[in-house]
Image: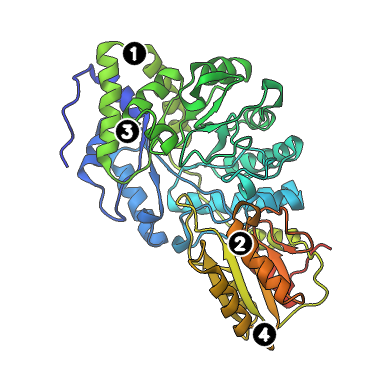
Amino acid sequence: MTPLASPALPAALDEAAHRCLVAGFAGTTTVPDDLKKLIERGLGGVILFTRNIRDADQVRALTSALRALRGDLLIGIDNEGGGIGHLVTAGAPEVPGNYALGVVDDPSLTADCADALAAHLASLGISASYGPVADLQHRGENPIVRTRAFGGDPELVSRHLRAWISATEARGVASCAKHFPGHGGTVTDSHYELAVDPRAYEELDLAPFRAAIEAGVPMLMSAHVVFPALDAALPATLSPYVLGELLRGELGFEGVLVSDALEMKAIADRYGEAAGARLALAAGADQVIVAVPELATTLACRDAVLGALADGSLSEERVFEAASRVQRLVSRYEVPVAPGEIATWDAGLVAARRAVQKGELVSPVEGAYVVDLFPRPHPALNWGGESLVSAVREVDPTADGVAVAGEPEDGEAVVAEVLKAAEGRALVVGACDAELYPWQEWVRGALLAARPDAVSVATGLPGAGDEGAVLSYGRGRVNLLALAEVVVGRGGGARP
């Protein structure tokens, strides 16, 4: 694709505008021509996804090719752990989701997990990790934060943020606390629509972000959430008050503020990605992420920013300020520190095992039939097909079962098939965030009513209906493996 003509600006201003963009792209080996042109004009960063990953050697070759075009290009990736990551095929360390780490509440173990992830990133030539999550999980209806958060207590979350940020920094990788000023008070996922947090200012979740800033986090990511107590009209990503007076003034943050992806429907459907880029930078963002692989969207955002500079609706001073912050960031993290030895490679499994809660499990079961109910994987996740069924089979090859990803067309048929398959053997019934998905509650209830001897397990955030269940506090591969070990009675262990 040939980029659309964009307004001619002085070279320094044009480069500064490009520094404010982070682009996604397609491909694993070849850098697209349009991306090369963006990089040559000063592109601030790229963000990698599963679509860009084949194996570790390929990723190293890709990051080297990108840096050969411009040495001060920030190369980032979502790398939260617990199923939020894109480097499975590149040999990423397995760590549980943050909620399990909060349950264990051992900051040194959290630091070990963060260290393993960051060392792996450094070994691949990736200089920025868009994590950790600093949101608080305190609403059972929240559909997007949940086990991505360390918990609901601000002091607990803050100490784990400090551990994560420090460990990542020690590896020469930039961390990014998100989603400022908090996504935990919503009942809407901003990937799909604009979210609103209706709470008063005093009730907002600012404490973890203060802790992250005090810990020296170099980046924060904004939330596509409206906070009427702060700005009744605009989501945080587009709000001069939130990104200016609150973040820079009250909280004193001097690092890079990057937007969440502009193609998320909270921005794209209401404002459009291009207008979102212009408005976010005018509001105080330093970089905007356009994560889609189609570079036409990135180019449209770029042209909107250049057009706003040309007509004066976006000030040159604001863009130079943002570009200066980005330049300081990329200079600091231009090349990740040599990774060295990852002494904590198994920290994730250790943490996952310590997090599992045994519930009312009386005795382990072998040769069981396992039914794993869970919502269809979120598009932001990198689901590798793992399930409780595969995890139990890994521990006990005599086990069998079925994974049900998303609401089945005929729930009664699923129940009948499971009960027939489980005749004469132990039955394990797993659910994930069932309180958000009535179909799971119904299927689980029908199975447990027919088989009161069945073992109930919960692989998401515990909620109504999970009483007495064996709990893993997450669906990362190590979460499921640790849970399987407890259910089968081999290896690991569990809290009562």
Residue 345 locus on image (x, y percent): 61, 60
Kindly report which numbered mark, 3 or 2, lies closer to the viewer in this rendering: 2
- Percent across and percent down for residue 12 are 28, 19
User: Residue 192 placed where, x, y %?
Assistant: 45, 41
Residue at label 2?
A: 440
Please tell me whether mark 1 sits on a helix, a strand or a loop.
Answer: helix
Callout in the foreground (2, 4): 2
Q: Which of marks 2 and 4 is nearer the N terminus?
A: 4
Where disc 4 sits, the SS reads loop
Residue, disc 4? 367
For the N terminus, the image quarter is top left
Where 140 sits versus 40, above or below? below
**Mark 3 lies on residue:** 43
Residue type at mark 1?
Glu
Q: Which residue lies furthest to the bottom in this view?
A: 424
Residue type pointed to by label 2? Gln
